[in-house]
């Protein structure tokens, strides 16, 4: 919209079959990701920006080794993000991004504790120095 509201859909798919040393394992992995998102700029100016984004993500990923399922994930994720940028008097830009992600138990999503999940617990903290 003219006010900056953006709504969209993304879909991506990948399939891998590594060669070289991993060829003997007959490793095959596939992934399909779909996202529905909406973003809106709460602040939009030359010196400062604040963008809020909400995303619902659907991920399906499998990995097979020697023809047997090694892992299978069906993830349903809700993400809320805030991106803030501020221009300073030295012509630099300070940028901060905060993201909250929550797994959802609907539409066939994997359940906590299932044996064939690729990861049982994950925590991510990232700081980028520019």
Image (spheres, rainbow, N blue to C red):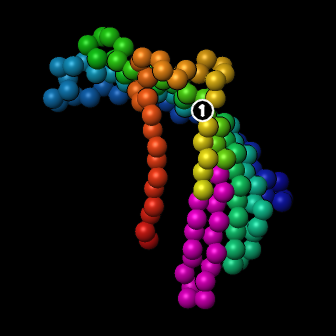
Residue under the image location 83 percent in, 54 percent down: 1
**On screen, 45 above or below 80?**
below
* Residue 46 shown in magenta: no
Residue under the image location 60 percent in, 42 percent down: 101
Q: Quadrant of the C terminus?
A: bottom left
User: Front-most of 46 and 111?
Assistant: 111
Q: Is the residue marked by circle 1 packed among few (<14), some (14-19), or many (20+) residues within 10 Å?
A: some
**On screen, 119 above or below 4?**
above
**Would you say 90 lies left or right of 8 here?**
left
**On screen, 114 above or below 50?**
above
**Would you say 35 lies left or right of 114 here?**
right
Q: Which residues are magenta?
A: 81-97
For residue 84, what is the image quadrant? Answer: bottom right
For residue 2, what is the image quadrant? Answer: bottom right
| Residue linked to disc 1 | 103
Secondary structure under badge 1? Answer: strand
């Amino acid at each position: 919209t003219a006010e900056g509201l953006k709504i969209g859909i993304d879909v991506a798919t990948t399939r891998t079959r590594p060669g070289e040393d991993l060829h003997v394992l007959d490793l095959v992995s596939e992934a399909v990701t779909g996202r529905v998102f909406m973003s809106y700029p709460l602040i939009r100016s030359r010196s400062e920006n604040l963008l809020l984004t909400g995303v619902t993500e659907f991920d399906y990923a499998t990995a097979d080794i020697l023809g047997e399922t090694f892992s299978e994930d069906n993830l349903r994720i809700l993400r809320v993000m805030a991106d803030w940028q501020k221009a300073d008097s030295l012509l630099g830009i300070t940028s901060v991004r905060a993201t909250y992600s929550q797994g959802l138990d609907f539409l066939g999503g994997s359940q906590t504790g299932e044996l064939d999940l690729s990861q049982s617990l994950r925590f991510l903290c990232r700081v980028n120095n520019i």
